[in-house]
Amino acid sequence: MECSQEAVPCKELWTAAHVDAVLHSERYAKDGQNILRTATLETLPHGVIVALDIVTTHDTLPDCWLKWEGQLHRWSHGG
């Protein structure tokens, strides 16, 4: 919560519910549509999960990836 308070100062102390509300507002427009952003891998922090739309000649790769230590790793809820 301290990181949230530093990044986006507010009068009240940050709570998990407050963080969830901010994250939700950053992911969805007022009409409910998902907000998509583009970025280069180098600009993203470690631990971020990204969606990619990559098709190779052999396979369509999963679209969820975790960036960790400069590398992308396949990510799923199942591990």
Image: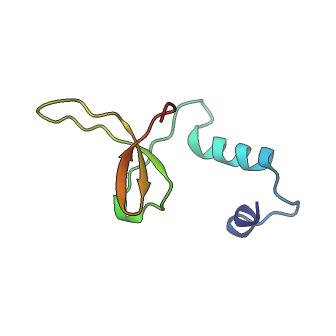
Residue 45 position (above or below residue 77): below
Q: Residue furthest left?
A: 57
Q: Is residue 26 left or right of residue 64?
A: right
In depth, the one of 54 and 66 nearer the eye is 66
Write the residue at 52% across / 34% down.
34
Q: Is residue 40 left or right of residue 47?
A: left
Residue 40 visible in the current orientation: no
Residue pushed farthest right? 12
State left or right for residue 23 relative to residue 1: left
Residue 17: percent from left, percent from top: 79, 44
Residue 78 lies, in percent from the top left, at 49, 30
| Residue furthest front in the image | 79
Q: Name the residue nearer the viewer: 28 or 56.
A: 56
* Image color mode: rainbow
Q: Quadrant of the N terminus?
A: bottom right
Q: Nearer the viewer, residue 71 or 15?
A: 71
Can the viewer see residue 31 in this picture? Answer: yes
Q: How many marks?
A: 0
On screen, 26 above or below 44? Answer: above
Residue 42, position as x, y percentages in the image: 36, 64
Residue appearing at x 36%, y 36% in the figure = 63
Nearer to me, 19 or 60: 60
Residue pictured at 65% horizontal, 41% vertical: 24
- Residue at (45%, 42%) from the top-left corner? 36
